Image (spheres, rainbow, N blue to C red):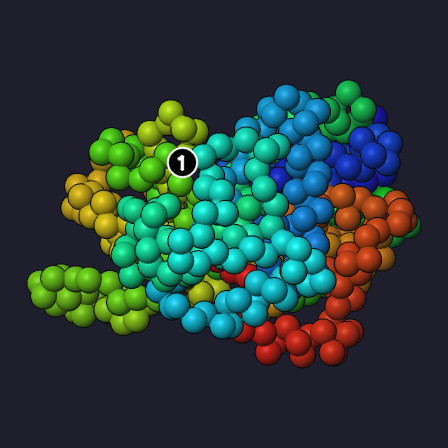
Amino acid sequence: MKTNDVEILVIGAGMAGLATAYYLAVEHKRSRLLIVDEGQPMALTSAQSGENYRNWWPHPTMAAFTDHSTDLMEDIARRTDNRIHMTRRGYLLVTRDDQPDELLRQLHAGYGASASKLIREHEGTSQTYLPPLSADWQTAPDGVDVLRGHDLIQRYYPAFDKEVATALHIRRAGDISGQQLGQYMLETMRPLGAQFQQARVVGIARTDRFLVDVIADGERQTIKADIIVNAAGPFAANISAMHGEKLPMHNVLQQKIAFVDRNRAVDRKMPFAIDLDGQTLAWSPEEREVLAAAPELARLLEPMPGSIHCRPDGGDHGQWIKLGWAFNSDPSEPTREPELNPYFPEIVLRAASRLQPALRQYLGALPRDRVHYGGFYPMTKENWPLIGAARTSSVFLTAALSGYGTMSACAAGDLCARAVVGAPSPAFAGVLSLARYENTGLMDELESAESRGLL
């Protein structure tokens, strides 16, 4: 195959682009396939992933979507002797609210007709809850355990803030190695004819075929293609604009930190814990004075949203932990090297210390062995992906995967590949495409939803 004349051109070699190419090559036997990206495969946003997955969402469509993706990841884990390092200790969503009616309503809505079978409630002296002692994804339970009451939660999670009154333990959830998953896909599809070229797309024209201008090795080249798959992550809207289409999406920069937990502040067997409660960060009077004087920092004195993340990283015998907090909501133009907030490590550590007070020992003393990183969440306003046909004929999308790119990439790639070749798709797939914007009932429902599933 000449790299300048292909059937399918996939733009973007992040997790979503590789997954789409993988299913096109492996399941649908498309061999004249080229992936292009300005950087190396699995770089940019895919290299900044939290690498977590879950099958719960406050809407049955997205729950079915992430369930499908988990099925596909488990299939790969099974066939590769778990090369992707899949674990399944779950997601633990906690709140100090002892009557979180809206949260429980969302929980039941996400599981739909299966809710009565999958949701287990535990209170008082209940002995039926199974704590996540093992990380083995094949032996972990399904569904969700709802723990009610301070004493019950303290029995199993004594390191947590004693005010925590409700915990939702999503069991089909955990983490994987996104880099290993992407590398496996590359290695598998290359012998089938798929190729990768490092190149920057600078223009798209259409005659009887697409003429895609790229810069590769400092030279301008033209790639001829019958079909384009736009999987360009935060740059998907830029690619669409090149062929005259506007996508209903924007980008929001989010950040994380990882560091060596030398003092073992976090239990290595703890699930991925998310403190759902908003809070006002605790600053000293001197710190408050400094923050108040800086307009870009003054917001940190006000009440902040919840959903602060913490999880062990590196397995039971590792030392690293990851902290994240997607509190930023301001859209911004994407760049390949985003400018990170130098205060973020201290901010997220203070927030995480509320749920796990042992982390306070690192305030002002974060280890030198740490990494501060971040990437853009490309998202629609309702936080659902864009998968399937674009408005432009013969263009397809695997885009707007927000903060759930790693966990949803297999399903997104599978569904987009099916759309490209015209294969049957699961019933939920239709409304994950641009077609949903013609469904006023659905869009009204999503507009009025209390939660968009952004954790």
Residue extending farthest to the left is 286
Residue 10 location, x and y as percent?
73, 41
- The reply, left or right, for residue 421 in relation to residue 156 is right
Residue visible at 74% across and 78% down in the picture: 440
The reply, left or right, for residue 413 in relation to residue 366 is right
Residue 309 x/y as whole percent: 40, 50
Mark 1 neighbour class, 10 Å CA radius: few under 14, some 14 to 19, many 20 or more: some
Residue 455 spot, x, y in % from top left: 48, 57
Residue 19: x and y in percent read: 69, 38
Residue 116 visible, this angle: yes
Along the line of sight, the residue nearer the viewer: 289 or 150: 150
Q: Is residue 454 above or below residue 142?
A: below
- Taking depth in this image into account, of 54 and 259 the one nearest to the observer is 54
- Say which amino acid is labelled 1: Lys
Pointer 1 residue: 269
Asked if one can make out residue 349 in the rendered structure from this viewpoint, the answer is: no
Viewer-nearest residue: 40 or 126: 126
Residue at the spot 24% in from the left edge and 31% down from the top edge: 262
Against 156, is 104 above or below?
below
Number of marks in picture: 1
Residue at 37% over, 34% down: 268
Residue 277 vertical placement versus 36 (above, below): below
* Viewer-side residue, 159 vs 297: 159
Location of the N terminus by quadrant is top right
Q: Secondary structure at mark 1?
A: loop
Quarter where residue 110 is shown = bottom right
| Residue beneath the point at 38% across and 68% down | 97
